Image: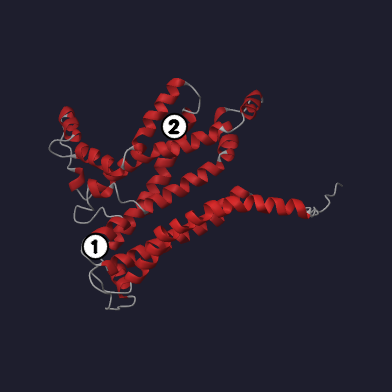
Amino acid sequence: MTTIAPSVAVPMPRRARRYMDRKSLVPLLLFIPPALILFVVLVVLPMIDAASFSVFDWTGYGPMTDFVGLKNYEDVLRHRHFGTAVRNSLLVIAISLLVQLPLAMWVSLALVEKRVSVNIIRTLFFLPYMLAEIAAGLIWKFVYDGNYGILPTIGDALGTDMPFVLGDKFWVMPAIMLVIVWKYFGFHMMIYIAGLQSIPTEVIEAARLDGVKKWQIVRHIKLPMIWGSIVISVFFSIIGALQLFDLVIPLSNGGPNNSSHTIVSFLYQFGILRMKLGFGGAVSVMLFIACVVITVVYRRLLFSREVD
């Protein structure tokens, strides 16, 4: 029976340790303070401001004197459109995980080879991601336009009447989902392709020589070896879905009848535009807490598996 001796930490010579500490101290002093200052100014202070707004009834003008405690949080939870916004955000997460990421994985498996023609196709799929969200939303608003858009033109060619999708409570969210999948699946595809191209070709060739089928190679070799890429991709999808705003505003502005709001567009519509900064601060704090909880849980569940 083979026994493994416990590892013993070998003390590093004092001179070498001092040299390494001094060497690592210089980049720390150069790069950490600017990053820390930016983080505090752009993240920490706005969050403190939002948290302070959330306990006052404040319009944004004058001093904050009307302290209301947790009333803004109660108003948010009782708001008749908040549930719709949460449901839509969860729907975006579900579509991203169940449609967008599998589609990106499938395309990445098909386009993993390094050839000129494949590179051109990859670039075409990646182009929507490079568009600004506002520009992409305006483009698709023209496509969906019920009078002059491309969709009714296609309907006329097929001899059928297309609905005004952005003005229909039933069709507006599927229309937004289509734009989300179109815009972001190329980004996730590139993450997966980077992971697939890092797999040693010897591993794949050895499996083929052993008679392993193509699907089995994908399932038992490729997917486990790009687990880190999948974890990052899923994390970006969830956090991005919770922060979705830029596409919703140009497409539907939360309508019709506030049926297509996400959490952030709900914050914008009922907090910022209506000068209820306390109400908006409460929504932002709740969203921040949700993102932190998801990040911590996700890190414990999936990132720990990646380390193992």
What residue type is disc 1 on? Phe
Residue 80 in the image, given as x and y percentages of width and height: 25, 65
Residue plotted at (46% across, 35% down): 190
Residue 62 in the image, given as x and y percentages of width and height: 23, 72
Answer with mark 1 or mark 2, whichever residue precedes in sequence.
2
Secondary element at tag 2:
helix
Q: What colour scheme governs how the chains and residues are painted in the rendered image of this protein? A: secondary structure
Q: Categorize mark 1 by other alpha carbons within 10 Å: few (<14), some (14-19), many (20+).
A: some
Secondary element at tag 1:
helix
Q: In the rendered view, does 149 fall on the left or right side of 93?
A: left
Name the residue carrying label 2: 107
* Location of residue 224 by image quarter: top right
**In 3D space, how far apart are the residues under numbered discs 1 and 2 (Cα atoms)?**
40 Å
Residue 282 in the image, given as x and y percentages of width and height: 33, 67
Front: mark 1 or 2: 1
Q: Categorize mark 2 by other alpha carbons within 10 Å: few (<14), some (14-19), many (20+).
A: some
Name the residue carrying label 1: 270
Query: Can residue 286 be seen from the camera position used here?
Result: no
What residue type is disc 2 on? Val
Query: Can residue 250 be seen from the camera position used here?
Result: yes
